[in-house]
Image (tube, rainbow, N blue to C red):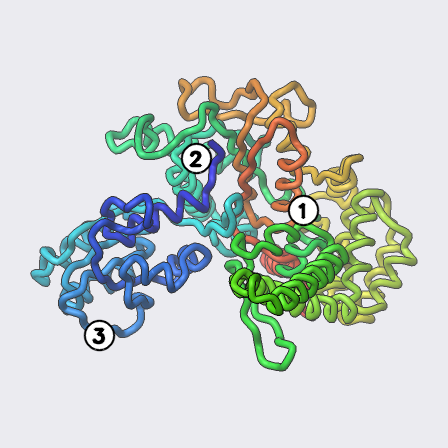
Amino acid sequence: MALNLRQRQKECIALMLNLNQPVNATSGMANEEVYKMLIYDKYCQNILSPLIHVEDLLKHGLTLHCLIDKERNPFLDVPAVYFVQPTHANIQRIIADTSNLLYDSFHLNFSSVIPRPLLEELASGAVNSDSIHRISKVRDQYMEFVTLEDNLFSLAQMSSYVQLNDPSAGDREIEEIIDKIVSGLFCVLATLAVVPIIRCPRGGPAEMVASALDQRLRDHLLSKNNLFREGGNFVSSFQRPILCLFDRNFELAVGIQHDFRYQPLVHDVLGLRLNRLNVQGEKGGMKSYELDSSDPFWAANRSLAFPEVAGEIECQLAKYKKDVDEVNRRTRNTKHLMSAVNCLPELTARKQVIDKHTNIATVLLGEIKERSLDAFANKEYDMMARGGIDQKEVLGALKGKGTKMDKLRFAIMYLISSETINQAQVELVEAALRESNSTSRSNIVDWAERLYRQSISAMTAGVKNLLSSDKQLALTRTVEALMEGKPNPEVDSYLMFDPRAPKPSSGSNHLKGPIKEAIVFMVGGGNYVEYGSLQELVQRQQPVRHVIYGTTEILTGGEFVEQLALLGQKMGLGDIGSAI
């Protein structure tokens, strides 16, 4: 049975919303209907947002829902379901709510394990206010991650790349960041109820996370309340999956580049967030759209290049018009009137989807023309495939259309992908950037060299082979090799951690394949380009395999460059992004 993170998290949420009572398999609700309040913090609201809609809350008997830090009126005869992070501020607010007798009973659910000091603080506050009898349950839900699709999740941990690479960060700060990432990954594995075999390259944040997660799983497997116990409530695969951990520096260029496929383009240009975006409507005003698996057009076409998507919209519209004409023809015959009427809801739903994507595509097309995004994407692809492009093309692009950020991303891509580059060429690029006010930095190459503590030539060694002959990203190629489980010079040096095996076996690199399921996690920020590439890998493989992609946070190219600029400031390299 393939791992389905979205479905598993929805099931856990349904159980929580029904006061952790058994849920009817048919209706998805508790056997006994109880009307309740839902209280959450901002982080947990983001967990719920892509998975649960208002109508779903009503089905679960949740008539009211609001943020924990908002003022709320008392409902003395209604139980309240709390879903919050285990923080000092949230504990203090819960104590205040119980003291003020806001609700009949309190069902407290924490997104991750509540530390003992906070649990003691909660107990002490409830005892002192004589309200401990109102606290019905306290649960660790192990849901501190945001699931966007069946095979996509984010820990929503902001600026982790900067934090992990900050030269001023001490060992304690780094350990805290690593521990936070490990806690999030542990929640993912607990939700899936799997103990994977962990693979990672040697050195850097990926190995630090792998080692700490291995120890966390080992300690938990020895505890009485083992979430991974066989024969529990969760279905486990016959063959254990692998968890492949990578650091953002493993494949830097993908975090910066422009991409011309529908999903990455919508994210980069229109600001897709939590599966939602707001765009200008045809008649003025803003339109809000949801883009997830419930949208058949999005599910079928999100991985296509934008011109193909535009063509598919035209095809869908033509088919819709043909079907409408057929229905109109049938309504003239009373024998077929009822069947024609029955077709109307389906036709209406199709028209809504077509109108939605027509509007999105129209806005995208305007941005593409205004910023020459197709030219940036094509030239950057050529850089990665060929190890550079003619400098005249580069200078022409930098002096042409595009935002300051577009040009800065393009320049960085050129500098880190060129196999050879001299000072005169660098000065020409910098002059073009200054002319377009994309940077105030006098030496962008010096910035790049010092930022990564290595020369440009060393950086490009890993970038010039970014795309293999079959146009795979290095990440996708490496994951494929790890899942094959055969000797391969690209992955033979990768470490292996097996939390179920005796400790001495950790750190070896022998694993027989092929592996059917993998969880790929990018430390320091991921993107829809990598996610799409991994899903394309799955679709073309036989026998069928399954890959889940996760990251500390999902970033656009612009957001990642802003983190690079901030990191450059912390390293005393000046403000390369001052003009962004």
Q: Residue drawn 34% across and 50% down?
A: 13
Q: What amino acid is found at the position of numbered circle 1 in the picture? A: Leu
Point out the residue furthest to the left here. Answer: 130
Image location (x, y in percent) of residue 364: 70, 66
Quarter of the figure that contains the C terminus: bottom right
Q: CA distance from mark 3 to mark 1?
A: 50 Å
Residue that carries the numbered disc 2 in the rendered image:
212
- Note whether residue 30 is visible: yes
Image location (x, y in percent) of residue 356: 61, 67
Query: Dividing the picture into quarters, in which one does residue 54 lie?
Result: bottom left
Q: CA distance from mark 3 to mark 2?
A: 44 Å
Residue that carries the numbered disc 3 in the rendered image:
73
Badge 2 local density, few (<14 within 10 Å), some, or many (20+)? Answer: some
Q: Residue drawn 70% across and 51% down?
A: 304
User: Quick one: SS at disc 1?
Assistant: loop
Residue that carries the numbered disc 1 in the rendered image:
252
Position of 448 with respect to 469 (left or right) is left
Position of 374 with respect to 264 (left or right) is right
